[in-house]
Image (spheres, helix red, strand yellow):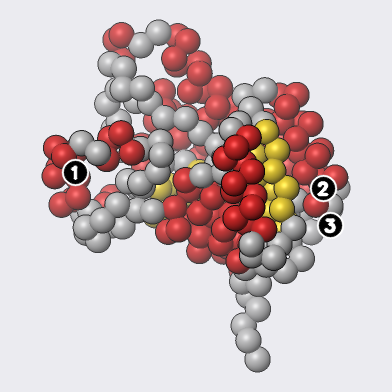
Amino acid sequence: MADSTFDLTGKTALVTGGNGGIGLGMAEALAQSGADICIWGQNEEKNKAAAEKLRSYGRKVAAFKCNVCDENQVEESFARTVEALGKVDACFANAGVGSLGTPFHNMDISEWRSVFGVNMEGVFFTFRSAIRHMLQREDGGSLIVTSSLSARHGMPKGEHYAATKAGVVAIVRALAVEYARYRIRANAILPGWIETDMTSPLFNLEKFEKNVIPRIPQRRWGIPADFGPIAVYFASDASAYHSGDAVTIDGGYSCF
């Protein structure tokens, strides 16, 4: 008899920022494991392409344009997600923006707030909608946020980014305690150096590659597909007793 522990048939997952990068890597694995998927993103062309790719796995797929900084858009998009797919069992708050590389002493408040708007308030709006939905369900649900190694390591010229990524780890730990009685669990994923559209300008620098690759025991950049298995695990019943954690996926970088 086949092991059905990681079979997501009958489950529905929402992935914000799911039209590319780590988000799409997670969404693909979730669909391959049987889940119906909704993705949110601001680029409608990327949303359409990602949705077509996800439908090739034979699952029901929805895609909505949503700016997670906008409270009303998040609430409306979540309602549309439930209308389209019936429920949300696992909510991946993955949408995020990176640092512009501005020295801290030259950073203006608009840049600071723009990063906090997506990486912190976007998670707040998304998880709040998800929790309100999950509180109405006997099965509860799973909340997962994409954090970063910058939550633990010093990140020069990225203090605002690092602060948001540390902050969301604190949020999921608090949610894990507050909502455990309702069978809602919350966890964070901390990616290391992952090759995506957002990081490609940095990874194309020869000096950066020569300095960083030797510090990664696996001697390669991470790729979006590396996050598929952990996404499936957190969406599945296998993680029913796993909550309040921050799981590092970095090829061994942080321990070398």
Instruction: Report the residue marked by disc 2.
Output: 84
Q: Residue at x 41, y 30 (%)?
A: 98
Residue 138 disc label: 3
The reply to whether residue 158 is in sight is yes
Instruction: Report the residue marked by disc 1.
Output: 209
Q: Position of residue 230 (x, y in %)?
A: 51, 60
Q: Residue at x 69, y 48 (%)?
A: 38
Q: Position of residue 100 (x, y in %)?
A: 36, 22
Are circles 3 and 2 on residues that touch, CB within 8 Å? no
In the figure, residue 26 lies in which quadrant?
bottom right
Q: Residues within 10 Å of mark 1 (few under 14, many from 20)?
A: some
The reply to whether residue 173 is in sight is no
Q: Amino acid at mark 1?
A: Glu
Quadrant for the N terminus in the image: bottom right
In the image, 40 versus 172, the foreground residue is 40
Are circles 3 and 1 on residues that touch, CB within 8 Å? no
